[in-house]
Amino acid sequence: MANITRLDSNARLSRVVIHGDTVYVAGITSSVKGDIVEQTRDVFRQIDGYLAAAGSDKHHLLTAQIWLKDITADFAGMNSVWAEWAPKEALPTRATGEVKLAAPDLLVEVIVSAAKK
Amino acid sequence: MANITRLDSNARLSRVVIHGDTVYVAGITSSVKGDIVEQTRDVFRQIDGYLAAAGSDKHHLLTAQIWLKDITADFAGMNSVWAEWAPKEALPTRATGEVKLAAPDLLVEVIVSAAKK
Amino acid sequence: MANITRLDSNARLSRVVIHGDTVYVAGITSSVKGDIVEQTRDVFRQIDGYLAAAGSDKHHLLTAQIWLKDITADFAGMNSVWAEWAPKEALPTRATGEVKLAAPDLLVEVIVSAAKK
């Protein structure tokens, strides 16, 4: 029988799905308006919370996708926050690309997979 | 030894790959011409079939990526079909972004992972 | 305790993360300047090396995402290299979309998951 746990489900999606010892987090966008640094900080703050709720943390990240509305303007700003947040001794794989998001104010959306501790 | 099963392989790719108890489905676009509602319905119809062939179903979805050619025009239409299709009690994580697809008629492409039942 | 191995980590990310018997490779772009054929060849050459280092190979691919800067111009060229490289008897699932990348010279970025042998 499949071993699936879902957290923070709304009418459309779950923020976290845990299957076996893998944790899926997707579609995380900023809950505050702001520039790329403010939005990226808010996204990683949320991801820290989701990973904690799932029995994981940023030291157990496996892979990340970072979607930026404007990669030319915002790659450096996103990376400055990533450099503060991502643990140097436990870096995931990462792909970053320019992808327009569902609302015009959104500058960044992040998808990660992590392992349970 | 790796436990991998591939289904519906053509000359370029497989539509379904099963590894252990995880099912990967990717690159699903509409087989019919039509607007975003018609194309999204056809994509989910295909995904239902692929999941069934893999011993899974939409109640065991883990995560989804939805790529739209025009997110401004088609986000609402895609979501209307998603709301009919995705099971409220078993929602996956989901990220939706604007990504131009391989043929000009294609409005939506979907990638999902699911668990075997 | 999580069973995670990371390979080829730089200051920002790891090129390979292994969790259990799943291998994640992401963010692979060409290390040489060139057209889509040259860049795609270089990307798959790197991926072959990363998979080998992880105890996998292209016959154990599970899923791939291929991001092209210009899908109209470069889909055919990328596919010509894919056809040479991807093993016909062991094709992964695959999604290909147009995603602008972090540097203007980059035409293609590839993300794959694979199983350990």
Image (tube, coloured by chain):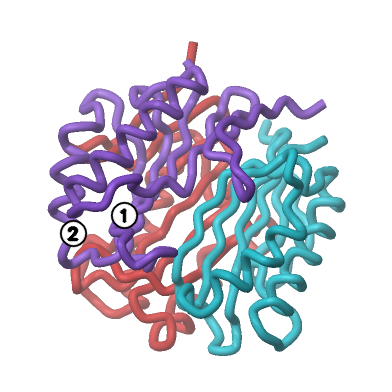
Chain colours: A purple, B cyan, C red
User: Looking at the rendering, which quadrant does residue C29 occupy?
Assistant: bottom left
Q: Which mark is residue A2?
A: none
The answer to which of A35 and C99 lies nearer the viewer is A35
User: Looking at the rendering, which quadrant does residue B59 occupy?
Assistant: top right
**Which amino acid is tagged 1?**
Val
State the quadrant of the N terminus of chain A.
top right
Secondary structure at numbered mark 1: strand
The image position of residue C109, as x and y in percent, is 36, 62
Per the model, the C-alpha gap separating discs 2 and 1 is 9 Å
The image position of residue A30, as x and y in percent, is 33, 47
The image position of residue A75, as x and y in percent, is 19, 57
The answer to which of A117 and C3 lies nearer the viewer is A117
Q: Residue at x 49, y 21 (%)?
A: A53
What residue is shown with label 2? A74
The image position of residue B23, as x and y in percent, is 70, 45
Q: Check the residue under mark 2 and report the chain it is in.
A: A
Q: Are marks 2 and 1 in contact (CB under 8 Å)?
A: yes
**Left or right position of A57 against A85:** right
What residue is shown with label 1? A108
